[in-house]
Amino acid sequence: VATEAAAANNLRFLQAAAVSSSGAVLASGALPALAEEIDSAEAYNRKVMTGAAYCLTLAFFLMGLIVSQARKLVENRWLN
């Protein structure tokens, strides 16, 4: 009786997994078909903004690194 119940649970689990995975596949396949085409000016602007974001992120990271190292040097009396 216990093995029959376990087998029924496994079957329900497999059916639920199959339904959810097939739903995800259908949804992911349907979404690109509904998307609008991006014109070249918008694609260029998106590339420029992405590049600027990467550069600013790197600049802020390096500035923070420089400031933290300068504070360490001042704390160790290397710059006095």
Image: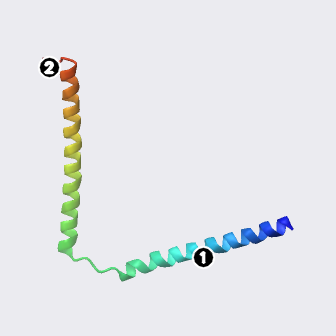
Query: Badge 2 is on which residue?
Result: 79
Alpha carbon distance from label 1 to label 2: 67 Å
Write down the quadrant of residue 51 in the picture. Answer: bottom left
Residue lying at 14% horizontally and 20% vertically, measured from the top left: 79
Q: Where's residue 68, x and y in %?
A: 23, 32
Q: Amino acid at mark 2?
A: Leu
Q: Position of residue 11 (x, y in %)?
A: 72, 72
Q: Is residue 15 left or right of residue 2?
A: left
Residue type at the position of mark 1: Val
Whole-percent x, y for residue 48 in the image: 18, 62
Q: Residues within 10 Å of mark 1 (few under 14, many from 20)?
A: few
- Kindly identify which residue carries mark 1: 19
The N terminus lies in quadrant: bottom right
Nearer the observer, 66 or 41: 66
Say whether marks 1 and 2 touch (CB < 8 Å): no
14 relative to 78, above or below: below
Q: Nearer the viewer, residue 70 or 34?
A: 70
Quadrant position of residue 49: bottom left
- Tell me the residue at 18%/17% (across/down): 77
Per the image, label 2 sits on a secondary structure element best described as loop
Residue placed at 12% from the left, 17% from the top?
80
User: Is residue 31 toward the left or the right of residue 72 in the image?
Assistant: right
> Residue pushed farthest right?
1
Q: Earlier in the sequence, mark 1 or mark 2?
A: 1
Report the front residue among 12 and 46: 12
Q: Is residue 12 above or below residue 63?
A: below
- Whole-percent x, y for residue 27 in the image: 47, 77
The image shows a total of numbered marks equal to 2
Q: Which mark is residue 27?
A: none
Label 2: how many residues lie within 10 Å, few (<14), some (14-19) or many (20+)? few
**Quadrant position of residue 50:** bottom left
